[in-house]
Amino acid sequence: MDKKYKPIACGLYDELELRALRKQRVKIIFLNAKDDNELIECIITDLFSKDNTEYLKTDNGRIIRLDNIIEMDNIIFNKNC
């Protein structure tokens, strides 16, 4: 995926951060490398930036670009910053 990164809304980032701090299990629907919707249940272990792109890391080692997240725990991620 070579698309340009679009920052997510600050409120959505705050939701991710809160769940990571609480070590809360979440359900995330996101676009995977094949541009298919994928659902995983995980704990967010880290939020980080690399090369002007934001990511999250899960407890099973998965790394997901934040702008590829479609939904988390019934919160729709359709708004950009």
Image (tube, rainbow, N blue to C red):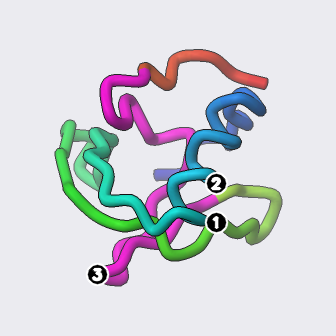
Secondary structure beneath disc 1?
Answer: strand
State which tag comes first along the sequence, 3 or 1: 1
Q: Residue furthest front?
A: 22
* Amino acid, disc 2: Glu
Secondary structure beneath disc 2?
Answer: helix
State which tag comes first along the sequence, 2 or 3: 2
Q: Are marks 1 and 2 in contact (CB under 8 Å)?
A: yes
Q: Provide the residue designation for mark 2.
A: 17
Left/right placement of residue 16 relative to residue 37 reads right
Point 36% across, 83% down: residue? 61
Indicate whether residue 59 is drawn in magenta: yes
Is residue 42 or residue 38 the one in the foreground?
42
Q: Are marks 3 and 1 in contact (CB under 8 Å)?
A: no
Is residue 2 or residue 10 the one in the foreground?
10
Is residue 12 or residue 69 the one in the foreground?
12
Give the foreground label among 2 and 3: 2
Q: Position of residue 52 (x, y in %)?
A: 81, 58
Q: In the rendering, which numbered label is found on residue 47?
A: 1
Q: CA distance from mark 3 to mark 1?
A: 14 Å
Secondary structure beneath disc 3?
Answer: loop
Circle 1: is it few (<14), some (14-19), or many (20+) Cα within 10 Å? some
* Amino acid, disc 3: Asn
Circle 3: is it few (<14), some (14-19), or many (20+) Cα within 10 Å? few
Q: Position of residue 26 (x, y in %)?
A: 32, 51
Give the foreground label among 1 and 2: 2
Q: Position of residue 57 (x, y in %)?
A: 48, 72
Q: Provide the residue designation for mark 3.
A: 60
Q: CA distance from mark 1 to mark 2?
A: 7 Å
Q: Which residues are magenta?
A: 55-75
